[in-house]
Amino acid sequence: MAKYAFWKKLDIWFNAIPNPFLTNVDWIDILITNHPANYNKLYTLDENSCYPIESNVYDTVLAWEVIEHVLNLEVFFSEITRVL
């Protein structure tokens, strides 16, 4: 997937295992424990699971093995749609 992810990218909840093939990517998670060299901005989710990111900023959102951990799917997809 990394070879198809161009422009402005957001990786959601990589769970401390960053994608080494991505470049120029931002990351959002519940807890930030490290800063991978190939990731730019790091965002932490707020208590309502809203993204502290402006609207219409990203061209690509990556979410690998995430959906089974999401408590509120409506907010999750709404926030992805908003930042895309």
Image: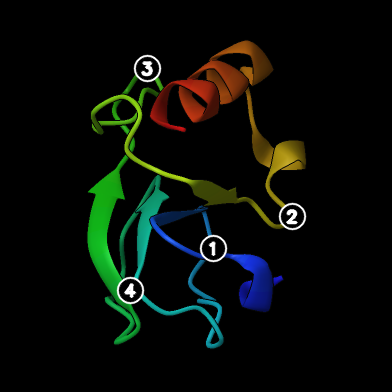
Q: Quadrant of residue 62?
A: bottom right
* x and y percentages locating residue 51 in the rendered image: 34, 30
Q: Secondary structure at mark 3?
A: loop
* x and y percentages locating residue 19 in the rendered image: 56, 78
Mark number for residue 14?
Answer: 1
The amino acid at mark 2 is Glu
The amino acid at mark 4 is Tyr
Q: Secondary structure at mark 1?
A: loop
Which residue position is annotated with label 2? 65
Mark number for residue 53?
Answer: none
The amino acid at mark 1 is Phe
Q: Earlier in the sequence, mark 1 or mark 2?
A: 1
Q: Quadrant of the N terminus?
A: bottom right
Mark number for residue 48?
Answer: 3
Q: Are marks 2 and 4 in contact (CB under 8 Å)?
A: no
Mark 4 or 3: in front is 4
* x and y percentages locating residue 27 in the rendered image: 38, 57
Q: Earlier in the sequence, mark 4 or mark 1?
A: 1
Q: Are marks 2 and 3 in contact (CB under 8 Å)?
A: no
Callout 3: few (<14), some (14-19), or many (20+) C-alpha neighbours within 10 Å?
Answer: few
Q: Are marks 4 and 3 in contact (CB under 8 Å)?
A: no
Mark number for residue 39?
Answer: 4
Tell me the CA gap for discs 2 and 3.
21 Å
Residue found at x 23% / y 28%: 54
The amino acid at mark 3 is Asn
Q: Is residue 80 above or below residue 37?
A: above
Q: Secondary structure at mark 2?
A: loop
Q: Earlier in the sequence, mark 2 or mark 3?
A: 3
Tell me the CA gap for discs 1 and 2.
8 Å
